[in-house]
Image (tube, rainbow, N blue to C red):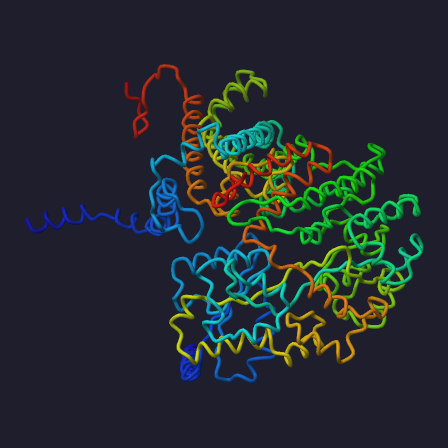
Amino acid sequence: MQAVSNKKKVKSVSYSHWGYIFVAPFFITFLIFGLYPILFTFKTSVTDAVGWEHVLDNNIMNPWYENFRQLFDPNSLVYGKFWGSLGNTIIIWFFNFVPQLGLALILASWFTDSRLRLKAQGFFKVTIFMPNIITAATIGMLFMSFFAYPIGPVNTLIQTLGLSNLPIEYFRSVEWSRGLISFIQWWMWCGNTMIIMIAGISGINPSLFEAALVDGCSSRQTFWKITLPLIKPILVYNLTTSLVGGLTMFDIPHMMTQGNPNETTNTVARFIYTQGFTGSRNFNMASAASVVLFVIIIIGSLLIRYILNDHDPKPGKVSRKGAFVK
Amino acid sequence: MKKVLALVLAAMMLIGMMSIASADEGKIKLVVWSFTNELQGMIEKYYLPNHPELEIEFQIYPTDGNAYTTKVDNLLGANAASDEAPDIFTLEAAFVKHYVEMDWTGDLKDIGFTDEELSVAFPVMAQIGQNAAGVQKGLSWQSTPGVLMYRASLAEKYLGVTSPEEMQAKVADWDTFLATAEELKEASEGACKMVIGSGDIWNAYQYQRSEGWVVDGKLVIDDELLDFEELCKTLEEDDLTHKGGAWSEVWFAGMRGELETLCYFLPTWGLHYTLKPNCVAGWDAENPDSEENIANATENGTYGDWRITDGPVAYSWGGTWMGINAAKAAVADDAKKAAMHDLIYFFTLNDDFLTQYAADSGDFVGSAKAVETILANGGTPNPFLGGQDHYAIFASAAALANGSLMSEYDDTINGLWNDYVTTPYTKGEKDLDTCLSEFKAAVAAAITTITVE
């Protein structure tokens, strides 16, 4: 009897609590530095907190949704600025993300193609990833001096090459300003996306590629019919993180153009910054705009999941042990 | 071996702790916050050696990305009386008005300053350190009057001007300034420009206003500002500038003489810390006074070619004020209050120290009385200015500039004025009415606590 109960005891020894202990630091940090500020932002968004002296005053607006009403009221002062900045952000994000994903996919499929066997892969991967290591603010400053007016490296170059007689004022042109920001974002994040795509493709069972090879698939067919459908979860992940990163874009427009010319490179995060940290420090409006942005990002992420997920009737669910369950 | 090492380390730690503990006794502890190590260096060099009773804890946060103001706001807003909160903190021109208007920053009279003591400060610097009700909350050890700096060789070559007095007649007001710019263009066939960019004159021109941006809680667009826009537009359209911005590559190229540029509007610090080190490519910052460096700067740069004159308007640009934390001053005992008073007084108003400091650093100090002493002692002939005495010119500008124009929202509103009016209007992108209405909308959105009509 004694022995049996001992045996039972040994069987029921559980190590799961170690798991909780190991993840605890993250959750404690998150609760203090992540969740609390988020909840605080929600609270501030319905108060009249303007200026540092009044951050903790807790005077709820009347009606409580007054700040949100202003964001959605076409006659209010912040309406045009907020939605205009959202439009700018989406345009800049779009022209960064589409070429970024396209190029990253091509590079990833080349690097993983067993038929191509590219040489010096490590070198290329590192080189392409490199811009991601530099701080965005540094790159913003770098490009600002590259494209300086009336004297700067790029202006000197185009004048020497005879492409233009007069220096071009890049940061007074909407296309150039937005284009440069998109380009920097693309250049910085392409390597990162590529690495994720390579990881995704490497996770595909090689026998599928071998089978395709035996069946006489061309490289293009392999890519469209096998690689792409199988890395869909990675694509969803990448699109979602890029959407979150893109819609909260701040540092490069802030360092390089300060929202100029005429607010056309003002992003939502810059709008929130100027509301909260310049002028009269309108923390209430900055928080309300943050909450609206939060909701927009959630809707956007859900849309991406919905669009990219298979809508075909599913043949069956995969159970945990890998067996099909009809 | 390890044990011995551990024992030694532990013993050292213990001794260290004991010495700190014993040093604490009977000392007055002050917490001083600043955004550069300038004040710390001054206190350690000039003040602490003679004040062994003081223990000063310095905290330095950069102003980049508003790190300093955010830190001050957080602590003074939530925990102003805590041990880590500053007793004394420094304030820069960009945000000094914001803090002197707040109750967080204490009245200097509460720690023992008297009207008599305060009266020797330059009025412009004192005015900026006062709130709207006239309570003195900040004092500056520097005074930063601005002047017009010009290149004597270019002035003589194109305008026939041989002395700063003649030059002053050419830039006595903004109309003559513009006429001189046109004359210069004609004489040099467009090679030499009056200024680098129209934005360069803003720091001076804003002192032309009779009212600041915000009066009685309302946004005021002074008529002078519209004249400023017309001046800038004419400068731009008639091609009278190099079309560069301040602090840009072109701006510095003009200082080195690579582009012919006649005038720069710069204050006291601009002479020593901006113009001088940039007067030649390869300025030797380690040994600025070495013979080779001066020879190189004279030969290949613009050293010795600069002169200064009052320019069209007396203005001030910059400065660092010392303010006190009201919450900690309120609970301080008399000894601590006296220590705070003595420290601030020493650096901002003490005649002997300021005379000494001006001689050591070349800085232009904040006390009118100290400046008088320096001038009486023979002034400061400056080889960079061809032997001209910069102190005399700075002193007259410092006495005239009107500090009451500054408001707590200047930083934001100046930025918006440039982005929404000056840049689009002078570049011909929009007409003035559109610019003004967009500017007003931007101000109203950014500053909800003032009325915009």
The image position of residue A319, as x and y in percent, is 30, 27
In the image: residue B336, left or right of residue B170? left
Residue at image coords 58%, 62%: B127
In the image: residue A227, left or right of residue A176? left
Residue B259, visible in the rendered structure: yes
The image position of residue A266, as x and y in percent, is 57, 36
- The mark tally for this picture is 0
Point out the residue furthest to the left here: A1
Residue at image coords 79%, 42%: B235
Q: Quadrant of the C terminus of chain A?
A: top left
In the image, B146 versus A274, the foreground residue is B146
The image position of residue B382, as x and y in percent, is 81, 71
Residue A205, visible in the rendered structure: no
Residue at image coords 46%, 74%: B111
Residue at image coords 38%, 72%: B331
In the image, A184 versus B171, the foreground residue is B171
In the image, B229 versus A139, the foreground residue is B229
The image position of residue A235, as x and y in percent, is 48, 28
In the image: residue A20, left or right of residue B279? left
